[in-house]
Amino acid sequence: MGYAFKSVEVLEQRDAIIVIFLGYFLIAVYFLYSQSMLSGLYGVIAMTIQTAALIGILHPMPFMNTARAIRHNLRLGGLLLLQCLPLMLLIFFLAPRMPPLFVLPLSPGQAKTGVSDHMTPGDIAQLSQSDDLAFRVTFKGERPPQSQLYWRGLTLNYFDGRSWKQFADDYEFRQLKSHFQSVYQWQPDNVKIKGEAIEYEAIYEKTGQPWLFTLTPATEVYGDVLRGADYRIMATRELHSPTLVQAVSYPNSRRDVKLAKYTQQLALQLPGTGNQRTRQLAKHLYTDANSPQDYIQQVLQRYRNQAFYYTLRPPLLGDTDTIDSFLFGSQRGFCAHYAGSFVFMMRAAGIPARVVAGYQGG
């Protein structure tokens, strides 16, 4: 809007040139917020119009009628942009990738879709979708059906009443590696292989985090990785460059044939107090259920039958009893709300459960 009003102040050629260069700057700023294909097309069109306007100001053609002059300037503006294309591609491929000098912070109460090592759904009032590339996968053989393309990454075991995180202690990366190698090691005997194998290789983009995403369970993994008892795969160093990993997975296998004592303790942990209405509901439903499987179906049926809605703009849930506030109050949320409340309901009934973070593949 300010740019449009600035155009009204144009009195001389110098003013017009300043406005046009301001327009170039605004186009560049626009790409800080969006880099989609549609945004790219918009940028090219806007650049062509800006360049055509600059040509018209610097080289007026009074002998042409207005429509003809506009067509001439647009054609010349597009040609100039095409002439810049080879240099642009050269710089894109040869120039070193420098880290940004600044980042655009999200507004308070806002988050992006993606994977984090903790989640506090009650504090998020808006979830903005991200189209950033996470990883690329090449399958050996036919592509698996969509139902088998859940790429598992993190496991969030610990709930403190508001947030879910990996463990009670906030381990630094080096401590987390040691924890995986000593206490939380991969247990191959805990998987009963069933069904067809899926072989693939994945190239993970640089994220500054060690989390890798695979089809579960990945029984064979080739790369510089660590494997945990909860089926997660973690790089031995944080990803600061694209990383290749090869794996073999059996999605139809039976997992957790026998839960280790430590794993079971993690999967049953709940705070001593809080969310009493949810605890009472879990106790009531479990008492009426014929089996743990029947109880699970009753909980899922409750989500289906009541007025729950999926939204990226959920209401804030406050500082306490966030599970109660979601299940008995707002009933509006995204995947974190549903996963967190479901796991709480399972644990409240004595059924081991954990929150898993990952991606549904496309």
Image (cartoon, rainbow, N blue to C red):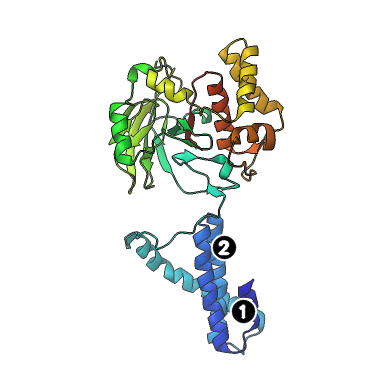
Question: For this view, does 183 lie left or right of residue 70?
Answer: left
Q: Residues within 10 Å of mark 2 (few under 14, many from 20)?
A: few
Q: Which residue position is annotated with label 1?
A: 6
Image coordinates of residue 110 in percent, x first then y, are 56, 50
Of circles 1 and 2, the one toward us is 1
Q: Is residue 203 above or below residue 53?
A: above
The answer to whether residue 176 of the structure is visible from this angle is: yes
Image mark for residue 216:
none
Image coordinates of residue 116 in percent, x first then y, are 45, 42
Q: Secondary structure at mark 2?
A: helix
Residue 268 or residue 82, whichever sits in front? 268
Q: Who comes first in sequence, dot 1 or dot 2?
A: 1
At 55% from the left and 27% from the top, the residue drawn is 344
Which quadrant holds residue 284? Answer: top right
> The residue under label 1 is which amino acid type?
Lys
Which quadrant holds residue 107? Answer: bottom right
Question: For this view, does 105 lie left or right of residue 62?
Answer: left
Image coordinates of residue 38 in percent, x first then y, are 56, 57
Residue 261 or residue 53, whichever sits in front? 261
> The residue under label 2 is which amino acid type?
Tyr
Q: Which residue position is annotated with label 2?
A: 42
* Quadrant of the frame with the N terminus: bottom right
